[in-house]
């Protein structure tokens, strides 16, 4: 999909400040800002590097202040927002913006057209900034470029103001070489800036009071100070680009791989994934490129045993277990990246404790959090999906089988946070003050959507997991467990149908409380009782649930978390954190749920061409969304009310993964068949419809 904007769009300040671009390096690091060039978030930066990949991220090079002089006239390329003023206004000189392997701007600077492009090198904390003189009307006119690197050196969750500014130092002899070495005791990573400038004019100073309008809107500190060591000066001429490389290690300009080679490697890695299977389909090609951004290495670059993980969302999330396994099929399996899927499964299986997997690997601690009831059940579903696509029976039968059995048996017998199987075969969970399901917003000690008891989607996942593990146990010859799991599945389904079905509303209750009282709120969690491969709900009841969700919850950019008109409904996700958290699961729409809805819709209609066409129509608004907010990706959430503005993270793993998965599987019908009892793939043969990409 071509992401490109013309002069008219680029010179509309409100438009270009609302559109954000993102490039990632596979280590948890990234570069991101707005099309205007203004940093509107504390998370924006040209080089944001992970001190402990993929977490511990620091904003190193925040941006650059750049300007072009043609003859005696200077033209700004930068745009800054300060309190009550935009200065300079480089966006007014923009001719175009597009995304290739990274962002590309073209500026009209008098008689000259100057192109600026940024490329983040995969597998390195290395950024390349390149300026090219494309044309000039007066060939004998001198064109000069001045660039000031602007450094932050702070944790990306913070801003730099007042006495908290780091003490940056420039190496004594750096001004005499084509490389600057910058360091600060407060920043764990050094910054090397190499260049082919004709001159470096040392003049270190702080620039104060950059305004971050997105932080202001979200109720956070919205001022940031940046430090510059001085200015690099270049002479620009056709065929002689100005190059700046910013890295956490010394990378000389003459040593860097030619930009064209790096760009070609990018296109080969992410843009050609679906070319053979779905030629000309720009939507799935762009989703494939977006999917690649979330896959990261967990551990040091030098560690040969480092695993793969998934960043839940950019710019601020870490790698979360629940998000990882909901998105795994879309991010990896549809793209034929079985090695990454295998590594992710192994990484989390190795971290199982008491039948639970980490909910997240946090930034500020080496100890993972285990406060989730659904992530382990999603792991079992992801392992089944992996078997479906790859046919790798060895991983499931020899490596994962025992950890997955541990999950089932600890849920059955009881584990942390009150998670246990009740006498009716259903799973209950919850302790005061802790929210274990994905609806996890809290304000202080106040849990906004308390779901203590038996949540509907947890029990749909439980039934699905029991059926999967029955098949696997039979395949490995563990007849005792196979019989036990099958009996649990039967009891679970029988009591699920009797306790969760709301006959008057023709849908499912959301939670059965510990007192036996059902919560009749119309929420999207019930769709999992239809969408999962082993659906606990079938026939007319399944069709009724799909219709209820379509009628009450479906929006162009996601499924609402609560039906309009319900007590506590909030259709806009705005304001400070308190206000936003109270709307997070009270009407806000989530794109990832659209994937589950499309799967359920197509299933209940028998996978007919007409059903697949309906699925395509439901996904159509996302083609427009790819040109909004986080360019080329799908946002975390959207307002539940029109005009359904995108909110939250600009790029979310399960949003991208689920839209990609359901488009591939349910709209295009490209997935292999599910493994079943006696299936050749469970015995070790590859699935008949598996596609080698």
Image (cartoon, rainbow, N blue to C red):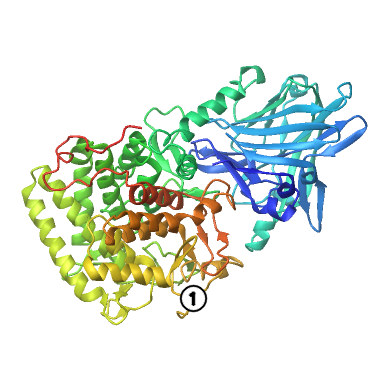
**Residue at the farthest right position:** 72
Circle 1 sits on which residue? 569
Q: Is residue 540 left or right of residue 447?
A: left
**Residue at the farthest front position:** 610
Instruction: Report the number of numbered marks.
Output: 1
Q: Residue 317 appears at what percent x and percent y?
A: 50, 51
Residue 195 quadrant: top right
Residue drawn where x is 46% and y is 58% of the image: 591
Q: Secondary structure at mark 1?
A: loop
Q: Residue 156 appears at what percent x and percent y?
A: 60, 47
Q: Quadrant of the C terminus?
A: top left
Q: Nearer the viewer, residue 570 or 110?
A: 110
Q: Judge whether residue 186 can be spotted in this image.
A: no
Q: Is residue 386 left or right of residue 86?
A: left
Residue drawn where x is 44% and y is 72% of the image: 562
Q: Residue 61 appears at what percent x and percent y?
A: 67, 38
Mark 1 Cα-neighbour bin, 10 Å: few <14, some 14–19, many ≥20: some
Q: Judge whether residue 71 can be spotted in this image.
A: yes
Residue drawn where x is 26% and y is 43% of the image: 672
143 lies above or below 594: above
Residue drawn where x is 31% and y is 37% of the image: 342
Residue 304 quadrant: top left
Q: Quadrant of the N terminus?
A: top right
Q: Residue 425 appears at what percent x and percent y?
A: 17, 67
Q: Nearer the viewer, residue 590 or 167?
A: 590
Q: Is residue 162 left or right of residue 403?
A: right
Q: Nearer the viewer, residue 191 or 575?
A: 575
């Amino acid at each position: 999909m071509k992401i490109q904007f013309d002069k008219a769009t680029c010179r509309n300040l409100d438009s270009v400040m609302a559109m954000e671009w993102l490039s990632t390096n596979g280590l948890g690091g990234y570069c991101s800002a707005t099309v205007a060039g203004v940093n509107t978030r504390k998370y924006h930066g040209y080089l944001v590097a992970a001190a402990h990949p993929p977490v511990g991220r620091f904003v190193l090079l925040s941006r650059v202040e750049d300007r072009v002089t043609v003859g005696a006239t200077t033209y700004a390329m930068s745009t800054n927002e300060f309190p009550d003023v935009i200065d300079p206004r480089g966006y007014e000189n923009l001719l175009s913006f597009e995304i290739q392997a990274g962002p590309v701007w073209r500026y009209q600077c008098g008689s000259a057209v100057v192109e600026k492009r940024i490329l983040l090198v995969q597998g390195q904390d290395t950024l390349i900034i390149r300026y090219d003189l494309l044309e000039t009307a007066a060939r004998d006119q001198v064109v000069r470029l001045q660039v000031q690197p602007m450094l932050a050196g702070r944790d990306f969750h913070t801003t730099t103001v007042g006495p908290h500014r780091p003490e940056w130092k420039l190496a004594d002899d750096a001004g005499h070489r084509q490389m600057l070495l910058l360091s600060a005791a407060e920043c764990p990573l050094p910054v090397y800036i190499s260049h082919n400038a004709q001159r470096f004019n040392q003049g270190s100073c702080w620039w104060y009071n950059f305004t971050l309008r997105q932080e202001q809107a979200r109720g956070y500190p919205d001022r940031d100070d940046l430090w510059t060591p001085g200015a690099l000066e270049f002479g620009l001429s056709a065929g002689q680009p100005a190059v700046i490389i910013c890295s956490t290690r010394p990378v000389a300009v003459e040593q860097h791989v030619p930009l064209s080679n790096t760009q070609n490697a990018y296109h080969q890695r992410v843009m050609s994934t679906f070319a053979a299977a779905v030629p000309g389909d720009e939507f799935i090609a762009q989703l494939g490129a977006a999917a690649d951004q979330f896959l990261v290495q967990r551990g040091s670059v030098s560690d040969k045993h480092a695993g793969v993980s998934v960043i839940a969302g950019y710019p601020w999330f870490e790698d979360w277990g629940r998000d990882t396994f909901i998105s795994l099929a879309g991010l990896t399996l549809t793209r034929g990246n079985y090695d990454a899927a295998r590594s992710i499964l192994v990484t989390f299986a190795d971290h199982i404790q008491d039948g639970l997997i980490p909910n997240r690997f946090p930034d500020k601690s080496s100890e993972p959090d285990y406060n989730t009831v659904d992530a382990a059940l999603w792991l079992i579903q992801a392992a089944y999906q992996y078997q479906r696509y790859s046919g790798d029976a060895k991983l499931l039968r020899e490596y994962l089988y025992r950890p997955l059995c541990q999950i089932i048996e600890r849920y059955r017998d009881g584990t942390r946070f009150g998670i246990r199987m009740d006498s009716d075969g259903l799973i209950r969970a919850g302790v005061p003050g802790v929210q274990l399901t994905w609806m996890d917003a809290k304000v202080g000690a106040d849990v906004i959507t308390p779901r203590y008891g038996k949540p509907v989607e947890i029990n749909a996942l439980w039934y699905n997991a029991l059926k999967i593990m029955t098949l696997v146990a039979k395949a490995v010859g563990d007849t005792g467990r196979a019989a036990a799991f099958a009996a649990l599945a039967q009891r679970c389904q029988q009591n699920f149908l009797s306790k969760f079905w709301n006959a008057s509303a023709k849908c499912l209750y959301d939670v059965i409380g510990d007192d036996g009282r059902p919560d009749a709120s119309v929420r999207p969690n019930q769709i999992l009782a239809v969408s999962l491969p082993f659906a606990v709900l079938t026939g007319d009841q399944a069709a009724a649930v799909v219709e209820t969700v379509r009628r009450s919850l479906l929006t162009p950019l996601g499924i609402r978390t609560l039906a309009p008109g319900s007590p506590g409904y909030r259709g806009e996700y705005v304001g400070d954190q308190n206000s936003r958290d109270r709307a997070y699961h009270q009407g806000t729409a989530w794109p990832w749920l659209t994937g589950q809805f499309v799967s359920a819709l197509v299933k209940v209609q028998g996978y007919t061409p007409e059903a697949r066409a309906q699925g395509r129509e439901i996904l159509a608004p996302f083609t427009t969304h790819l040109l909004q907010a986080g360019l080329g990706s799908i946002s975390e959430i959207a307002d539940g009310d029109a005009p359904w503005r995108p909110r939250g993270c600009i790029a979310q793993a399960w949003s991208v993964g689920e839209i990609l998965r359901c488009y591939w599987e349910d709209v295009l019908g490209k997935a292999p068949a599910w493994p079943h009892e006696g299936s050749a793939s469970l015995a070790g043969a590859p699935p008949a419809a598996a596609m080698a990409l």
